[in-house]
Image (spheres, rainbow, N blue to C red):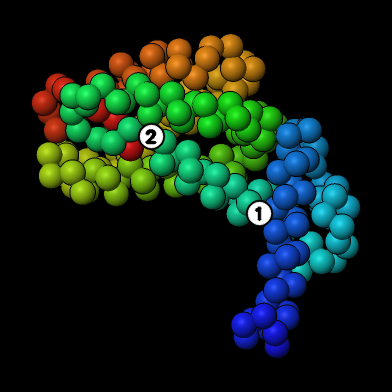
Amino acid sequence: MKDGGVPSGDRRVRRTRAALARALLELAEERDLSRISVSDVAERAGVSRTAFYDHYRDVHELAEIACTAMIDDLIGFLPASGPDPEGEGPETLAAFFASLAGHAGLYRGLLGPRGSAHVADHVRRRLAAAVRDRLRRDAAGPPEASHDVLAAFVAGALIGVAADWLQRECPQSPGRMADLTWPLLSALDPGGRGDAGVPA
């Protein structure tokens, strides 16, 4: 045992998983996720197929885990709920689309028609959970019973718009996408006031 008491086996596990995650993200920029095999990932990572299966069931499970941090970053870009007197909603929504565009090949592969339904559902569930959490923290938000419905609606809408934009090779700029999307999302008034922002 070295390196501050961290068992060498744990370090090897972390290194292997990091290498597999990097390999998958690189490959997803080059081709559709459906065309990436376990052998492809293992070869790119410099490990054996056996080593891959020591950690993951299949490519889809690895994709879900590898993209968790990136998904959290995307969620962090979304506007907060409530009124938007400073007009920051469109700007933060533009940052969300810009982050997608920065990894367009990856997200297109994961969320597109030949991608992974498992990963797409994972993205939707994480986004809906973030929406729900913010609604519960918002004193002016809707009754508790409506949290799940509104959260699912917002998550589904954002993922649908993002996936369509990515599949069409991002024909509008992130800023233009924010301008088009913000009025639709801001109309979802969580407090019944008519002036609320996106509950994200």
Q: Residues within 10 Å of mark 2 (few under 14, many from 20)?
A: many
Q: Which mark is residue 86?
A: none
Identify residue for label 2: 78
Q: How far across and how far down the image is residue 51, in percent? A: 82, 66
Using the rendered view, name the quadrant where residue 195 is placed: top left
Amino acid at circle 1: Glu
Left or right: residue 176 versus residue 62 is: left
Residue picked out by circle 1:
61
- Taking the spot 60% from the left edge, 30% from the top edge, the residue there is 102
Q: Amino acid at mark 2?
A: Leu
Q: Position of residue 63 (x, y in %)?
A: 66, 48
Q: Nearer the viewer, mark 1 or mark 2?
A: 2
At x 59%, y 47%, the residue is: 67
Q: In the image, what residue occupies the spot 53% across and 32% down? A: 99
Of marks 1 and 2, which one's residue comes earlier in the chain? 1
User: What residue do we see at 71% from left, 62% from top?
Assistant: 17
In the image, taking residue 29 as reference, residue 5 lies left or right, namely left
